[in-house]
Image (cartoon, helix red, strand yellow):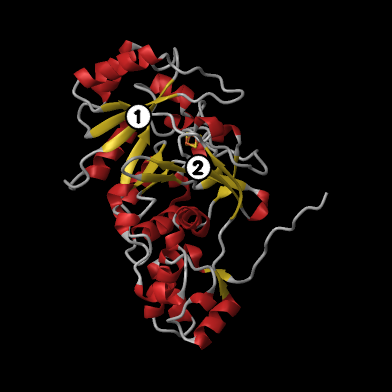
């Protein structure tokens, strides 16, 4: 068997640089900062992967960039399409790891579910990614690359066709976008890879890159409380909280992070996140339905009471079983009853449609391939 060597490069990968970082790069190499906007557009709006394509950049600068820099994304090693149109890509990273990214098409939008780490260290009991263990954080380039790669695969118009089009055409026309929403809900806990996630989000929101609105980019977190406070200051996108339980006793068992940051602290951090901003009207509570664990009528009433001061909507997620999982999904009748109780208490509660389950792309089923699965985060070492 031949093992492919890891790709090692001494060149700077510009794919993950946000505008500020890109300007700093051009200043450092003695170029004018406006080059940052040009190059950002070529990479993210036109899908360029080669500096020679950048026709409004001088030949000498193109040559220089080719010598010192690169635009390098993970390679797609497999693509699977589900019967409902959901697409899952397996992307190979340097170091032999791989991650999964999922595109979910709906009538009026297309959502890309992006990974932020190779595996996850938080060990939530109902999660397939958790069973894979944790290897490392993704770089900002590896995070934004998932959008870059999916954009090129889904929308050939977004790719560089010819110089005339790229010079004059606005190929990243927001009306024709295939990917309208991004959720950081794939492999990993995004707030444990804070700096790289925030840099990638800057690119998602950046007008010279993807130009998505804050409302259309969602970070899903199990509740890393100090990072939530920091996020509010640096990048206040939409929020989904993986709550999954109405009290600490249940949550301690299925989301171990709760022992470090119990529900009260987490919900106070959410309140702080939204304080003083009337535009961010509500956040989402994610609640996976586990038979006999968190799905009783008493649990539903407890949840309604717990959330009563918070501007949230509740997503009830039928559990997607995977090999070796210790849980069963609640019966549909139970989920409906749970929803009705929340509804009568005044909440918007929806049962999330399971998408892509025939290709293991449904919520909680992403696994990728994690080398060295032994790393776990010690909760008492986390800040
Ligand atoms: S549910 Fe999210 S935070 Fe928990 S182990 Fe899975 S990926 Fe990590």
Residue 192 drawn at (x, y percent): 47, 46
Classify mark 1: residues with Cα within 10 Å, few (<14), some (14-19) or many (20+).
many
| Quadrant including the C terminus | top left
**Mark in the foreground, 2 or 1:** 2
- Count of labels in the image: 2
Residue 220 drawn at (x, y percent): 39, 40
Q: Give me the C-alpha separation between circle 2 and circle 1.
A: 34 Å
- Residue 245: image tag: none
Residue 240 drawn at (x, y percent): 35, 38
Residue 284 drawn at (x, y percent): 31, 35
Which residue: 50% across, 75% down? 53
Which residue: 45% across, 55% down? 151
Residue hosting label 2 = 87
Vertical arrangement, residue 124 with respect to residue 370, above or below: above
- Residue 263: image tag: 1
Q: Does the image show residue 224?
A: no
Which residue: 60% across, 37% down? 133
């Amino acid at each position: 068997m031949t093992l492919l060597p890891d790709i090692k490069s001494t060149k700077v990968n510009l794919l993950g640089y946000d505008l500020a970082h890109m300007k700093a790069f051009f200043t450092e190499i003695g170029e004018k900062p406006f080059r940052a906007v040009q190059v950002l557009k070529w990479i993210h709006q036109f899908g360029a992967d080669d500096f020679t394509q950048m026709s409004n950049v001088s030949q000498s600068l193109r040559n220089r960039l080719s010598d010192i820099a690169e635009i390098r994304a993970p390679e797609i090693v497999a693509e699977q399409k589900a019967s409902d149109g959901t697409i899952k890509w397996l992307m190979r990273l340097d170091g032999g790891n791989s991650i999964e990214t999922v595109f979910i098409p709906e009538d009026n939008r297309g959502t890309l579910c992006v990974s932020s780490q190779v595996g996850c260290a938080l060990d939530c009991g109902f999660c397939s990614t958790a069973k894979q263990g944790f290897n490392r954080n993704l770089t900002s380039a590896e995070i934004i690359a998932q959008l870059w790669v999916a954009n090129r695969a889904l929308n050939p118009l977004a790719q560089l066709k010819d110089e005339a089009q790229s010079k004059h055409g606005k190929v990243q026309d927001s009306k024709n976008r295939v990917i309208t929403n991004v959720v950081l809900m794939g492999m990993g806990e995004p707030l444990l890879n804070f700096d790289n996630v925030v840099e990638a989000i800057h690119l998602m929101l950046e007008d010279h890159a993807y130009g998505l609105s804050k409302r259309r980019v969602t970070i899903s977190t199990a509740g890393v409380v100090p990072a939530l406070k920091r996020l509010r200051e640096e990048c206040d996108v939409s929020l989904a909280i993986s709550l999954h339980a109405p009290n600490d006793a249940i949550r301690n068992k299925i989301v171990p992070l709760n022992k470090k940051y119990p529900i009260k602290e987490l919900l106070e951090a959410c309140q702080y996140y939204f304080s003083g901003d009337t535009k961010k009207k509500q956040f989402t509570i994610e609640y996976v339905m586990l038979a006999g664990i968190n799905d009783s009528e008493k649990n539903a009433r407890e949840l309604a009471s717990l959330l009563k001061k918070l501007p949230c909507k509740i997503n009830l997620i039928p559990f997607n079983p995977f090999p070796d999982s210790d849980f069963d999904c609640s019966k549909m009748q139970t989920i409906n009853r749970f929803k009705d109780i929340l509804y009568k208490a005044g909440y918007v509660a929806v049962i999330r449609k399971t998408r892509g389950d025939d290709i293991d792309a449904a919520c909680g089923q992403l696994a990728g391939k994690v080398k060295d699965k032994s790393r776990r985060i010690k909760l008492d070492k986390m800040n």
